Image (cartoon, grey):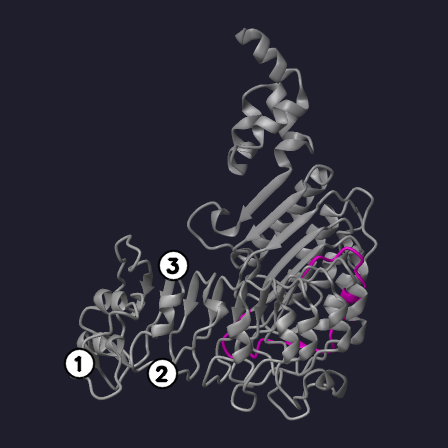
Amino acid sequence: MQADARELVFGNADLLGACLSFVEPHDLLTSVPLVCKAFAAAQASPGACWAALELDGLRVTTTGSAPMGAETAALFWRKLAAWARRRAGGLRSLRLANQRHLLQQLEPDARLAALQGLWAALGGSSDGPSCSGGGGGGGCALRALEVGRSSLALPPGGLASLACLSQLRQLEVNTAGPLDTAELDALGRGLPALEELRVCLMRRRGEHCAFRGAFPAALARLPRLRLLHLEAPYSALNAATIALPDCASAWGSQLEELHLINMGIEALPPALGGLPRLRALCLARNRLGQHPGAVPWALSQYSGFADGPPAVVGELCGLEELNLSGNLWGSTVRDLPAEYSQLTSLKYLTLTNCELSALPPLVQRLSSLLLLKVNINTIQSLPGGAYLRSLECIDLAHNRFTAGYPRALAAATRLQLLSFQHNGVHYSDPAIALRDALAPPPPLDHPPPATAAGDGASAAAAAVAAHAVFTAAPVWLPEVFLPKAPHARVAMLH
């Protein structure tokens, strides 16, 4: 039986390659070829053993203890391109991590040539760097590529050179420094099969990291795009204003997630309402409603607001996740547009740092919410409402709940996680205080006993006061996991 199994494995190149795909890349290169001819042949072929590859720059070492120099780094990239060219027909997924250590010794021109050479090899082209204009080679099999987080910026043209990987379905790039949106336009033209695109800019000391230029309209014309994530790091400097074009309606029925973070967006086009499958929309740290007249006239007619959250978002009836954090409209607009009442499927709502002094009344009617984040505002009390029925997680940190835990939380019978730090109150026993706040109200035929808390003070307020010591400065509270009991069901994050 063992002989039959051995014959089955060694006699089937595809099966042998699938087995070798679980071996570490270093062993695949060094030890596997020494086992036997069958192993050596499988290692050298563009088969299943190289279908997914992760290359970590920290694990690439040179002879001796000397750091890698420019000449050694250039040689490494040439050898890597030659190696990848022989296996490009089988490689489906590639993740490059910690590439700073392999690129920082190269000058910008040499760095660009090194990356272009690798992309050309993976694209099945033997033309070298000249393939960066797009088109790609017929032998490209790569479907997913991730360029890991690095504080080293890609050289100009480094992102656009990826356009030769014409069969890519998923692309994630994390790079430092500013980025011209013209490179994203080149990607949109060269990668027609792209389904997921994530581009995140990392912080770089001494340089303002932002997207520069107009919104890449070519991305809106990608026929298969399901997820688009463009993110720049927060900066005290104002990011350049980027307008989302009307051609965004070309995403049609396929776009499911849209994340545009810190892009300097001041307005949304009416065309955004024509995305019926959109289920996640993140517009954090933009400028929606920050300036009078920021929302176009056509949108303001929906809600009657001159500024504030764009009402057109309310037409996305299937939306499950909405993030409007960092848009400073709460000081001028008291409520969300009436159209948001149509978001009956909304499960995750984030209103972090929106200058809210009270919970918007419309939020109280969203009965499907599982998570609500209203941290970093100036809210002092929490009203009751249908939103508490399904709520499992709520973030109230960095507000002004100086009277203690809101009594309205007693109606949140499914609550599992509560964040309440930095509200200007310190409890001598947080577990008891929270238990009292979440306790159901006494029955009407048993009125609460009189307390010394003053005329008109409720028993709940007196119970909280009995366990609270109010302080002027916010403090960190210890993390407390309450026992599994009907009246104590919340794990607090403090």
Residue visible at 32% across and 64% down?
492
Circle 3 or circle 1, nearest the eye: 1
- Residue 483 visible somewhere in the drawing: yes
Q: Secondary structure at mark 2?
A: loop
User: Which residue of the protein is positioned furthest toward the left in this rendering?
Assistant: 452
Is residue 164 in the magenta section?
no
Residue pointed to by mark 2: 400
| Residue in front for this viewpoint, 109 or 345 | 345
**Bounds of the magenta span?**
202-227
Image side of residue 94 versus residue 151, left or right: right
Residue pointed to by mark 1: 451
| Residue in front for this viewpoint, 122 or 410 | 410
State the separation of the CA atoms marked 3 and 1.
Answer: 31 Å
Q: Using the image, tell me which numbered label, if any, was put on residue 421.
A: none
Q: Position of residue 397 (x, y in %)?
A: 38, 74
The numbered mark, 3 or 1, whose residue comes first in the sequence reads 3
Mark 2, other Cα within 10 Å: few <14 / some 14–19 / many ≥20: many
The numbered mark, 2 or 1, whose residue comes first in the sequence reads 2
Q: Amino acid at mark 1?
A: Thr
| Residue in front for this viewpoint, 444 or 304 | 444
Q: Position of residue 187 (x, y in %)?
A: 75, 62
Residue pointed to by mark 3: 416
Q: Quadrant of residue 488?
A: bottom left
Residue visible at 39% across and 60% down?
413
Image side of residue 430 versus residue 81, left or right: left
Q: Amino acid at mark 2?
A: Arg
Judge whether 333 appears above or below 112 on screen: below
User: Which residue of the protein is positioned furthest toward the bottom in this rendering?
Assistant: 292
The numbered mark, 3 or 2, whose residue comes first in the sequence reads 2
